[in-house]
Image (cartoon, coloured by chain):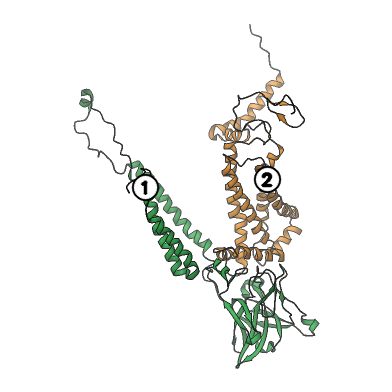
Amino acid sequence: MTPGPSGHGPAPTIWPLGFAVGIAVGLVGLVIDPEVIGSLGGAIAIVFGFLWARAATSDMRTHVPVVQAEVREATPAEAAAMPAAAPATPATQKMPRSRFLEGATLGLGGLIGAVVTVPVAGFALLPPFLRQKGHKVDLGALTDFPEGKWFITTFLVDPSEGDVSRRTAFIRNNGPVNNVPSFTIISNRCSHLGCPTQANGPTGAILGEKNVVEHTANGKVLLRPVVPAGFGCPCHGSQFDTEGNRTAGPAVRALDRYAFEIDNGRLMLLSTYSVSHVVGIGAQAKIYKYKLAGPGQHVDGPEQWFYPLQPPHH
Amino acid sequence: MAIRRTQSRAQVRREQALAAAMYPVDWLEERSGLVGGLRYFLFRNVPSDTNWMQTLGSATLTAFIVQAVTGVILAMYYQPTPNDAYASIQNITDHVTMGWLVRGMHKWGASVFIILMFLHMGRVFLFGAYKYPRELNWIVGVLILVLGLTEGFTGYLLPWDQTAYWASVVGINLNGTAPFLGPWLAQFLRSGQEISGETLTRFYSLHMLIIPGGIIALITLHLYLVVRLGVTSPPWSPEAAGRDETEEEPPVRTGLTRPVPHGSAGGRD
């Protein structure tokens, strides 16, 4: 790079523009298509950023002062004392021994550090994101769920984990639609910050009905009959109607739902998905489905742009 | 002829005892320089008008040391597994000798530590002690505060009761609502997509190993900077910060509270 007109610093370059373009493409990509366009923008930004940095530091890197060793003529006495044929040492040693050792120590040390750090960091950071299992929960025979009745259903997602994997869903059998059973299965995890929502309404003994206990591959499954007017969260007061639509409070979307399947006449819970809102009721409901998002995260509207990339999960 | 006072027997014995006591200290000093280092660290010059408020930093350090010591002892009895954690806490509280006391110190000491950090920060702010050249020490202090709050968050889950569990659910999900990386942070803290036994062990490891290690490193840096840069005078001090030893006569005291600098001591106008 030639010095600029003022004589200070390098001349203006076009690299920052390319860098800005890369950042812009990356931001747009985060919204449109994070994997392809987002990483394309990132790559452009990295390449131009590198070129920019190279241009900006070129002066510092090119003008390395070359220092000559001091020499003087030997006095006759010294010349006489010198060995006749002094071993020819190269005038400018490219890599003095001390610098080589310094570099080797730093380089090897860094390499050893990386060899130790990379697996440890991976061990600490990656397991929460890799090999996340989906689940399939056996809730018992279909006959346990009479048509039109709500049940507060508690079950263990993973019996080997014990009580810590206990979850609750509100389940209603909507009756068959075109000979296919229809269920409304709402997760009780509040879409505000994840507290357990409760059914607003009388349960069990007050209704004169008995709890149903099933022992399945997923351990004890408890069905408590309930007549809910809606669902409410005890933590921060969000309220939801019986389709899980938010009616009040700080929640940002409707309650999540479970996918399900019927397997040999048994109700099986599959993975959870998020719902922005539901129009209609029961079997006729139109559910606006989204990939599962954490509580408090918007799945629709402009706020969804804050969460362009969800970590891998089921 | 010079008169030489003879020492009494008691004096001689005292000197001999002192020499014997100092022998191991001198031995250590000669080989390590540690004694001189400790002396340099502890016996520093401070402004003559330092204030009791300036002991809040030491108080915070003391609170942290209490947390560290009681935490290490609690770790001897606590079991970070989902099926045993709550029972082991009950065991510590009800059955282990003095367990109630140590757990209580750790529990209440946590709040004391946080409160003292804030008081210390307020003192530094009001005294203007964050100004040049001490900005870096303010930044380090803020990092210690953040790590201290993280200690509170991770420690809260460990009793593994309903309060602990749901507070952590809410806390983790709050992290999850942060834009862009929030969902990833939440899943990292949760150690997966759902809270599980691994969440408990992860919080335990963060709480007793990783974060305290960071706090200890930052406190070391914090103290190094305090020793290097010295203690600030209170804002009402007549002495200019960074003054020479030889600069001026001591100020004249005219009232009960404030020393008044020279030149303005005449009248009370």
Is residue A224 shown above or below A300? below
Chain to which the residue tagged by mark 1 belongs: A
Is residue B45 shown above or below A284? above
Is residue A154 shown above or below B18? below
Query: What's the amino acid at mark 1?
Result: Pro
Q: Point out which mark residue B143 bears.
A: none
From the rendered image, report the letter of the chain displayed in orange. B
Query: What's the amino acid at mark 2?
Result: Gly
Tell me the mark number nearer the camera, choosing from 1 and 2.
Answer: 1
Q: Is residue B21 visible?
A: yes
Chain to which the residue tagged by mark 2 belongs: B
Q: Quadrant of the C terminus of chain A?
A: bottom right
Q: Quadrant of residue B38?
A: top right
Q: Is residue A49 visible?
A: no
The picture places residue A308, in percent across and down from the top left corner, at 52, 68
Is residue A300 shown above or below B134? below
The picture places residue A152, in percent across and down from the top left corner, at 70, 79
The picture places residue A33, in percent across and down from the top left corner, at 47, 70
Q: Determine the CA span between mark 1 and mark 2.
A: 46 Å
Q: Which residue is mark 2?
A: B122
From the rendered image, report the letter of the chain displayed in green. A
Q: Specify whether A116 is left or right of A167.
A: left
Please name whichever residue, B145 or A278, is drawn nearer the observer in this view of the structure: A278
The picture places residue B176, in percent across and down from the top left corner, at 60, 65
Q: Which residue is mark 1?
A: A10
Q: Quadrant of residue B8?
A: top right
Describe the element under mark 2 as helix, strand or loop. helix
Describe the element under mark 1 as helix, strand or loop. loop
Please name whichever residue, A122 or A272, is drawn nearer the observer in this view of the structure: A272
